[in-house]
Amino acid sequence: MILQSGLPFIAIALFLMALLSRRKESESVFYSSWFEKVAGALGWVSFACYCYFETFRCLLLEDYVRTSFALIFLAFSLLLAFLLMTTREKGDADLVLTITKVAVITAVFYFPFSELALLGDTLIFVTAKLSVMMLNLLDVGVYIVPPSGIYSTSSSFHEVYKPIEIILACTAIQSMALFTGVVFGVTAPIGRKLKAFLVSVPVIYGLNILRNALVGAAYFEQWFGSPLHSFFIAHDVLARIGSMIVLIVIAYAVFVILPEALDLIEDLFRFFSRIFSTRIRG
């Protein structure tokens, strides 16, 4: 859908307008202008609209995990749009704008790949190619059929079973974009930002290639019974558990190198807790 594909770029433009319109009272003090708040809030509303369409798309695909995430981001986006317009305290406004900065960096590194076919297909092809190379290193006979098909060298295998298709979700672009946004969105020395980036994004991509290869090996080598059952165990169970553990470890490493990122998360939770407790008491 053209409308849905355009919404993230509208949000990015509005976020940039909000961040670039911040004006100084002095060298160290900023204040929020009316235009900054409106532009930022409209950016979050645009992103919420994208999540709305994404929710229905995931429902049609019966992908209930992604549907849940889309609903969470939808609610989060609307909440931030509301808070950006109603927050009066400078510290709270700065916090919401920092979250907006993280969001715009994340969006810049994710949506061009998810919404522009040329970039997305290129990333998918490179990931598929590297996954095939890793499978060959593991002594699994496979080859790639561009742009994203991974086939067994055993022709009889495909008389019954389909090849593996690498899709955008198999590239780990979501996790890499999120870590990029968090690392470069907080205020910290550039040296520590680069260290945090290097222990997160390249590591995530490298381990994702290994993950794809192991799932492929389980499927083609029938590690857990039939190919389809092996794929389910490897992809939907073991790989998801392993990915969660890896992301937790990488996040811990980032927080050690860049405690400002952890501070941002803690400040956000404290902010939400204070807002909700005030609303309940009020």
Image (tube, grey):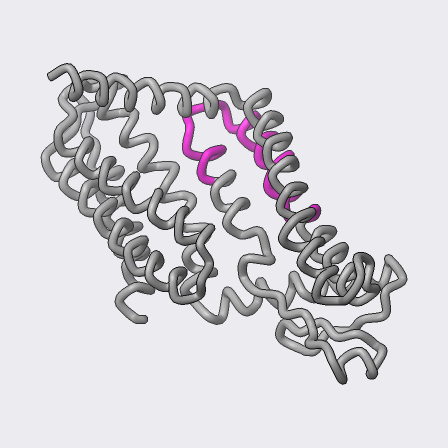
Percent of width and height locating residue 79: 23, 36
| In the image, farthest residue toward the right | 139
Percent of width and height locating residue 86: 13, 29
Horizontal relation, residue 86 to residue 118: left or right: left
Q: Magenta stretch?
A: 181-207
Q: Look at the image and say whether residue 54 sits in the magenta stretch.
A: no
Q: Look at the image and say whether residue 195 sits in the magenta stretch.
A: yes
186 or 131, which is in the foreground? 131
Q: Is residue 198 visible?
A: no
Q: Is residue 168 visible?
A: yes
193 or 63, which is in the foreground? 63
Q: Residue at x 22, y 21 (%)?
A: 275
Q: Residue at x 60, y 39 (%)?
A: 244
17 or 161, which is in the foreground? 161
Percent of width and height locating residue 29: 23, 18
Magenta span: predominant SS is: helix
